[in-house]
Image (cartoon, rainbow, N blue to C red):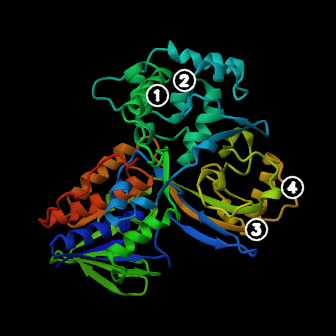
Amino acid sequence: MHTTIIIGGGVAGLGAAYKIRRAADAGHDVDFLLVEKSDRLGGKLATDHITSDLGESFVVDGGSDSFLTDKTAVHRVARLLGIIDDEVSTCDENKKTLIVKNGRLVELPDGIMMFAPTKILPMATTRLYSWPAKFRMALDLVLPRKKIEPGERNEESLESLVVRRLGQEALDRLAEPLVGGVNGSDPAQMSLAATYPMLLDMEQAHGSLVRGFLAQRKKVEEIKKKYPAKPGARRRTFFTSFSSGMQHLTDCMADAAGRERIRTGVGATAISRREDGMWEVTLSDATVLEGNAVIVATEVWAAAALIGSVDARTADILDTIPSTSSATVALAFSRADCPFDLGWHGILSPRIEKQPVTGVSLVSSKWPDRAAEDTVLLRAFVGGPHNRDVLERSDDDLVETVRGGLSRLLGMAKEATPLFSRVYRWDRGMPQYTLGHLDRVEEIETRMAGIDGFALAGGGLRGVGVPNCLESGEHAVSKVLEDAGITLEEDAVKEQRVY
């Protein structure tokens, strides 16, 4: 029996465990043991089903509330689990995005793709940008593309690319809160080669970001014409979730993998390899597990602390990958206390606005059936690279900060009392892909390839999204089993359009 010890019970670790279970069901002599230091599984997929004092029901995601629809890994695993019909699309009739400007809300103009304009009239009439900024953005159409020498990696920060192509105001008003905010990153240090390489490719292919996004929009429109939605089919939207929240995915993977092989509330403290090639993992309760392989699927900083005895150089490289902390504050109010339009999904607050709340998601308008009738459910976000001390503040302080911010931005009554509040803290929860990240990752992967029966997984290397983390766990399983001469067949699930 080939046993793999998996450290970490987030989506990467559970994705690894579920793949091993599928391999066992297919006839391979394999098994796993998974340990998770928290008392719960799921990592940043944390869903609460809350009933208020008045008996109203709510579904609240404390971490990721969705995944990119175009990335197929979650759909594939959902089909295997039999939960594909539990997937749910956003309510796009309410999909407006609002941007804070001078303390007030301005609607994101139609035709903006990420941060580049693709329609003239909405751009000309928007209050989001000044006229000098609009003219500066138009220069993107005539500025020469960046010259890349043969064999040179096309590497640049978000700040550098946007300011060079579109100007400073384009960065400050939208690119920083939209792209940098999603990744919790400092635009001056954020590696586009590691996060959004298609932006760098657009400039090289089209000579302009605006022309690149115009070509992308045209391609999307052609696909829609070629593959029209089938009558009665679920709408295809940019983001997808599960009807009962994102933790549904990890809960189902844990059930299918076998919870009898999973331990929570106990962490790994040391990893070592014996002379006979077997691995040992020492736990925080002094238990020692032994197995044929180890997969470390933890936060990048936790992995760095664990694997020094396995490969000191890799541990040192992981130590150079920074992480930022944040908190999600969920609040529900009576509709009567919310005298504002509900036809939007989110608010973004640029750093130049100096607002304590960096963003707001209007959950009750974004997703169906997440909040009771005549109530409003919101998630607000605080922290990030420029507010690193957020986790030092109490829950009450964070709730009051968010409540005050909502009052100023939305006109909510200052005395409005939440039906409930919930704070989710993510200590060093977002790894930062800074300049040079891909070089570091390539060195790590080269070193890991030379260590039989050992692999890393999680969001610290090649993608922080749910599908990326899920695939990283699956790839880690393939690696350690192939090290032992066990080759797995691909999942017998067609990769097809879900909608």
Instruction: Specify the amino acid type for callout 2.
Output: Thr
Query: For the point 69% across and 44% down, which residue is it?
Result: 343
Give the spatial CA distance, label 4 vs label 1: 41 Å
Q: Are marks 1 and 2 in contact (CB under 8 Å)?
A: yes
Q: Are marks 4 and 1 in contact (CB under 8 Å)?
A: no
Residue sitting farthest toward the front: 231
In terms of sequence position, does the residue under pointer 4 or pointer 3 come before the other? 4
- What element does badge 2 sit on? loop
Where does label 3 land, which residue?
419
Do we see residue 349 in this rendering? yes
Give the spatial CA distance, label 3 vs label 2: 41 Å
Instruction: Specify the amino acid type for callout 1.
Output: Arg
Q: Residue 118: which numbered mark, if any?
A: 2
Q: Residue 217: which numbered mark, if any?
A: 1
The picture quadrant where one finds residue 162 is: top right
- What element does badge 3 sit on? loop
64 and 35: which one is in front? 64
Query: For the point 41% across and 36% down, which residue is it?
Result: 228
